[in-house]
Image (tube, grey):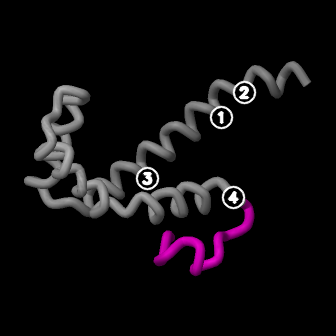
Amino acid sequence: MFRLLRWMPLVKLLVVAQIALLAWRHLQRLDASDRRRLSELVRRGRRMDRSERDELRLLGKLEPRAFAAATANAFSPVALPRRLAGRSTR
């Protein structure tokens, strides 16, 4: 049992790396100008004014539901039904 515990940090690292890869692939769906603007807005944080907060609709282009479904499919032994995923996730 203690041998298994020694491998846990490696497993956690692999999980984090796989999620980072999925996020990177997902972010590639935005064009360069949208990625740049979204990163500027995220850096501003709570100092955003009303118009900048409205610009956060760029997050809708990222399809957070599809990202969540892709992440769930990556780690689940059973694939999500397409109606829950909303679109093809693999």
**Which numbered mark, 1 or 3, is in the foreground of this view?**
3
**Which numbered mark, 2 or 3, is in the foreground of this view?**
3
Closer to the chain start, of discs 1 and 3, is 1
**Which residue appears farthest toward the bottom when viewing the image?**
83
Residue at position x 59%, y 73% in the image: 84
- Residue in the foreground of this view, choosing between 3 and 79: 79
Mark 4 sits on what residue?
76
* Percent coordinates x, y for residue 50 in the rendering: 15, 42
**Which residue appears farthest toward the left when viewing the image?**
33
Which residues are the magenta region? 77-90
Closer to the chain start, of discs 4 and 2, is 2
Give the structural element (helix, strand or loop) at label 4: loop
Residue at position x 52%, y 37% in the image: 16
- Residue in the foreground of this view, choosing between 75 and 6: 75
Instruction: Give the amino acid at mark 4.
Output: Ser
Residues at marks 2 and 3 touching, judged by CB atoms closer than 8 Å: no
Mark 3 sits on what residue?
22
Instruction: Give the amino acid at mark 3.
Output: Leu
* Percent coordinates x, y for residue 47 in the rendering: 18, 27
